[in-house]
Image (cartoon, rainbow, N blue to C red):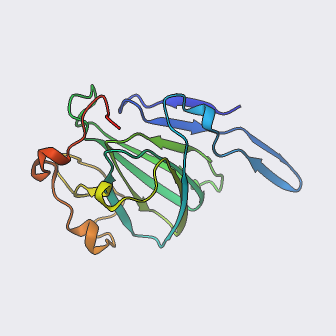
Amino acid sequence: MAKITESQIIKGVQIVEPQMHGDSRGIFIETYRREWFPLGREMLQANRGDRQRGCVVGLHYHLHQADYWYVPFGTCRVVLHDLRQGSPTDGATEVIDIGARADGTHDHRGIFIPPGVAHGFASLTDMTITYLVDGYYNPKDELGLAYNDKAVNADWGFDEPILSERDAANPTRDKIDSQRRPFWPMRT
């Protein structure tokens, strides 16, 4: 059975360490199971992103959607920032490296990200990320926070990342319209 641990930094973020099974043929890993997240909703959509080394994606956040991230190939630096007004961890930032390690092993951890927690990642190597979401794509719930906001204060692993136009234009935390800030507890 997988080991599920709540983040000590951001309330509601869950880190999954799956159980691995293997023999001379290779490995088998259960990367996601609905019952691991009793307060979560059913995941409805699966996505995959391939990124070259040096990219930063995000920070993004949703008022109504949770994500579950898993990196089957490469190394990913996940950056999380709690934007939920009234949350016991509002304003906290967490940085977690997942995927391949320098010693050639792979940690196979997954991360459950609740609504209202801004999330982004840096591709420390060429990488693939898969993510499950509990809501279908909704452009009105695709919100952003500047990756380099001083309030986030994250080490992304490099100084000049490759960014999309959208992510380069994300506002700083103090410029987010109060109507677009999530609240604690989250409303769905």
Give the residue displayed 25% in from the left and 40% down from the top. Answer: 182
Q: Residue furthest top?
A: 88
The single residue placed furthest to the right in the displayed view is 24
Q: Residue 145: which quarter of the image?
A: bottom left
For the image, the number of numbered tags is: 0
Name the one closer to the observer, 162 or 59: 59
Picture quarter with the C terminus: top left
| Placement of 68 over or under 104, stated as above or below | above
Q: Quadrant of the N terminus?
A: top right
Residue 10 coordinates in the image, percent (x, y): 35, 33
In the rendered image of this protein, does residue 148 appear above or below residue 114? below
At x 42%, y 51%, the residue is 78
Q: Nearer the viewer, residue 108 or 37?
A: 37
Q: In this image, 54 relative to 127: left or right?
A: left
What residue is at 25 percent from the left and 36 percent from the top?
Answer: 84
Q: Position of residue 72 (x, y in %)?
A: 62, 58
Say which of 2 and 64 sits in front: 64
- Residue 122, placed above or below residue 27: below
Residue 94 position, x and y percent, is 35, 41
| Residue at the image point whose x is 23% and y is 48% from the top | 153
Q: Give the image location of residue 125, x and y in percent.
A: 50, 66
